[in-house]
Amino acid sequence: MASTAEDLQAIRENVRALCRDFPDTYWREGDKKGEYPQEFVKALTESGYLAVLIPEEYGGSGLGITEAGIILEEINHSGGNSGACHAQMYTMGTLLRHGSEEQKRRYLPGIAKGELRLQAFAVTEPNAGSETTRIETRAVRKGDSYIVNGQKIFISRAKQSDLMLLLARTTPYSDVQDKTQGISVFVVDMRHVKGNLEIRPLDVMVNHHTNTIFMEDVEIPASSLIGEEGKGFRYIIDGWNAERILVASEAIGDGHWYIERASSYACERVVFGRPIGANQGVQFPIAKAYAHVEAADLMRFDAAAKFDRKEKCGAEANMAKLLASEAAWEAAEVCLTTYGGYGFARDYDVERKFRETRLLTVAPVNNNLILAFLGQNVLKMPKSY
Ligand SMILES: Cc1cc2nc3c(=O)[nH]c(=O)nc-3n(C[C@H](O)[C@H](O)[C@H](O)COP(=O)(O)OP(=O)(O)OC[C@H]3O[C@@H](n4cnc5c(N)ncnc54)[C@H](O)[C@@H]3O)c2cc1C
């Protein structure tokens, strides 16, 4: 049953209350030290909010993308970074829609209880980039196992996760007529693999715990395969709308954080004998960014409502991701400008959020690819690839 407006408001307030225990200093210190926000993820898991997409029969609360989006939005709105744990929500659809009953019973109750972590999603490769069908990681069936060889890059939280969703070619690109065929998805239990699985941290601009992964003769049970062999690209695509709506929600949360910080700083900071916010050159960009965040929010809720009603929502989900990540980035720039030099001082948190928000225009999917989707699939213009 769909949540009422009161239910959604209650989720918002409960997540806000939880986030109050993790103030700016918590995220700032973690960012400085490159630490994973373990205590926050534990609290979120114990509250049940990380398991909202898991159906009740497997121990979750069986809610929809609308509710999941509000949770991620409020984490980012509080000054936190839901990038620490969002993958569990991003990947859930693949397991729920295409996993076997046995896989769901094996993993979902443990994930819902917080005993098992599904925080890693391994798609990107150095030689494929945005062209996912060009991935070269190979999984070859051998008896009751698959032997995996290859390399992945930018695979976040692999060291903070027990399970990893892995995309690999079971038939090489050169042997398929349709390039989307011959790709398979596996749920890999990284605690029990045989062979050489090396996870090497990659130093990036944000506190994101991302890694290069090297797999050499990694042996995983054949029962790790999700759905049918060779159909994995389709399963991943099925999850993209959810992922885009969730990223949009995170961006909306960031957008509101910047607008609130910028407008309150603009009221407090006095230069030339008056609050800087009295100057239209300061005030109007904040007002404009606010309008853009609010407009993107409408698109996000439209996409989420369609998704939860199981209606087609590819166009809306993609537009929500595009508009929300751009609106949040506009708000980030406006906030930094409003703070002047203090925007660069770590103690104000603007520079940290600024780095975190920028990522949302690039990952998990680049906005250029979103525009290509809209241009080619919605507006039927010629393909660029
Ligand atoms: C911090 C971080 C965390 C990440 N976490 C994960 C993760 O957990 N799992 C995972 O699998 N991946 C992850 N990624 C990877 C991320 O999804 C990719 O970086 C992103 O999808 C873009 O791919 P790319 O970097 O290879 O860019 P490329 O594909 O090399 O593209 C480079 C540029 O060219 C543009 N471009 C390419 N082709 C076209 C075209 N046809 N038309 C127009 N423009 C084009 C792109 O939009 C981009 O601007 C992460 C990345 C970062 C930075």
Image: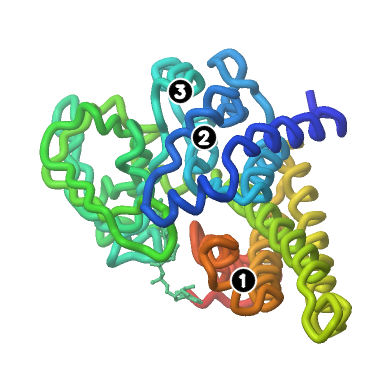
Residue that carries the numbered disc 3 in the rendered image: 114
Task: Give the secondary structure at mark 3.
Answer: loop
Q: Is residue 224 left or right of residue 269?
A: left
Q: Residue at x 88, y 78 (%)?
A: 278
Task: Give the secondary structure at mark 1.
Answer: helix
Q: In this orientation, which residue lies closer to the viewer: 76 or 315?
A: 76
Residue that carries the numbered disc 1 in the rendered image: 371
Q: Quadrant of the N terminus?
A: top right
Q: Residue at x 38, y 47 (%)?
A: 35
Q: Position of residue 169 (x, y in %)?
A: 28, 49
Which circle marks residue 92 in the picture?
A: 2
Q: In this orientation, which residue lies closer to the viewer: 46 or 335?
A: 335
Q: In this orientation, which residue lies closer to the viewer: 175 or 288?
A: 288
Q: Residue at x 35, y 38 (%)?
A: 160
Query: Which numbered mark, 1 or 2, is in the foreground of this view?
Result: 2
- The amino acid pointed to by label 3 is Gly
Q: Residue at x 58, y 50 (%)?
A: 24
Badge 1 residue CB within 8 Å of ligand 1: yes
Q: Is residue 137 visible?
A: no
For ligand 1, give the image quadrant.
Answer: bottom left
Query: Which numbered mark, 3 or 1, is in the foreground of this view?
Result: 3
Q: In this orientation, which residue lies closer to the viewer: 17 or 103?
A: 17
Q: Position of residue 204 (x, y in %)?
A: 36, 63
